[in-house]
Image: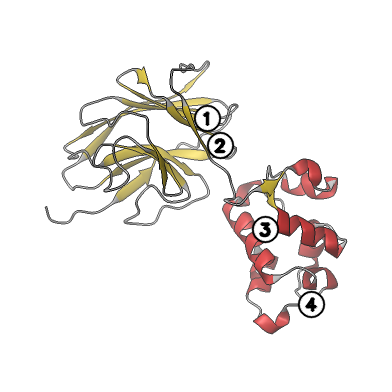
Amino acid sequence: MKNNKMITVSLTQILENGIWQMEAEFNNSYNIAAIGIVRDTYNIPADTHPYCQHMVSYGMINFGETVGNGKVYYKENGTSGNIAYQDNQIIKSEYDSEKGTLIFSVDGVQQPVYVRGINEKVRFIIFIYYPQASCTIRSLKKLITPTTKHVANEKVKTMKLISEIGKSLKSIPDTLAQVYRLPFLKEQILAEIKQAKVTFTEFVKSGTCASSAAKSISKQTWKEIYYIERTLLPIFDIRSKELSQCLSQPDNAWV
C-alpha cells in the first residue's frame, strides 16, 4: 500500500457534565484502527499513534505490533481482556463524567477492561492507518442514564493527570487549592512551595525569577509546574506567561 499514514482525529464535541456515548463502525481497515478519548487540551499532531500519554485507545487485532489483540492503551501501557474487534462491528464508547469512567462495548456486548480516574474535559477519537480505510460515526449523544453495568472479569486502567504519584488537595494550603483545584500535585512541588513559605499564587503573580519566592523553587519544579499549567490551562485562573518567562532564563538565574 502507498501513502499509509497514522491518522488520529478527534470529534469536536467536548465531553463534560454528564454521560456521552459514541458508536462507530470501521471499514476496509485491515484491522488496524482504534477508538478512544483524548484530553481536550491536547492538539493531536499529524502522524500520531493514539497510545501516547494524552490518549486512551482501544484497538483492533492489528492495531500495532505490540498493542493489538483488543488491548486498552494509556501512556503506551496496554491492558488485555477485551475482544479484538474487526471491520463492520459496532464499537461503542461511553464516557461518564460523574464517575470519571470510559467503558467500551462491541456489538452490544460490554467489555471488561475500562478506564477510570478521568477528571478533566475529553473528546472522542478515532484512528485509521490505510488510505482506503473509513470510519462511520453512527451516533453521538448525551444520555440521561448510563447503559453500562458491572460485568465478569472486570479490569481497570487508571488515568491520572500526572504520571508520578501526587498528593491529594487535602494536604495543600486552602489558598493554593482554591486557585488550582487540582486533584494531584507532585510531592516535590508541594514541598518546595511550603519551604518557600509562600503560596503558589503569590510567587507566580510576582512575575519574575528574581523574586525571593521564585528563587527558592528549583528549575525542575518550575518545569513540572509549567507542564501542569500548559496541560490544564482551561481550569487555571493564572496563565502561563510568567512561567514561560522564568523558564527562558539561563541556568545561572536559578538557585
Residue drawn at (57%, 36%) of the image: 117
Circle 1: residue type: Thr
* Nearest to N terminus: mark 4 or mark 1: 1
CA gap between label 2 and label 1 equals 6 Å
Badge 1 marks a residue whose secondary structure is strand
* Nearest to N terminus: mark 3 or mark 4: 4
Return the residue at label 3. Answer: 239
Circle 2: residue type: Ile
Assess whether mark 4 and mark 2 are in contact (beta carbons under 8 angstroms). Answer: no
* Nearest to N terminus: mark 2 or mark 3: 2
Badge 3 marks a residue whose secondary structure is loop
Crowd tier of the residue under label 2, counting other residues whose Cα lies within 10 Å: few below 14, some 14–19, many 20 or above = many
Residue drawn at (73%, 42%) of the image: 168
- Residue 210's disc number: 4
Assess whether mark 1 and mark 2 are in contact (beta carbons under 8 angstroms). Answer: yes
Q: Is residue 46 above or below residue 21?
A: below
Return the residue at label 1. Answer: 101
CA gap between label 2 and label 4 equals 37 Å
Circle 3: residue type: Arg
Instruction: State the image quarter where residue 22 is shown.
Output: top left
Badge 4 marks a residue whose secondary structure is loop
* Nearest to N terminus: mark 2 or mark 1: 1
Circle 4: residue type: Ala
Left or right for 117, reference 236: left
Return the residue at label 2. Answer: 118
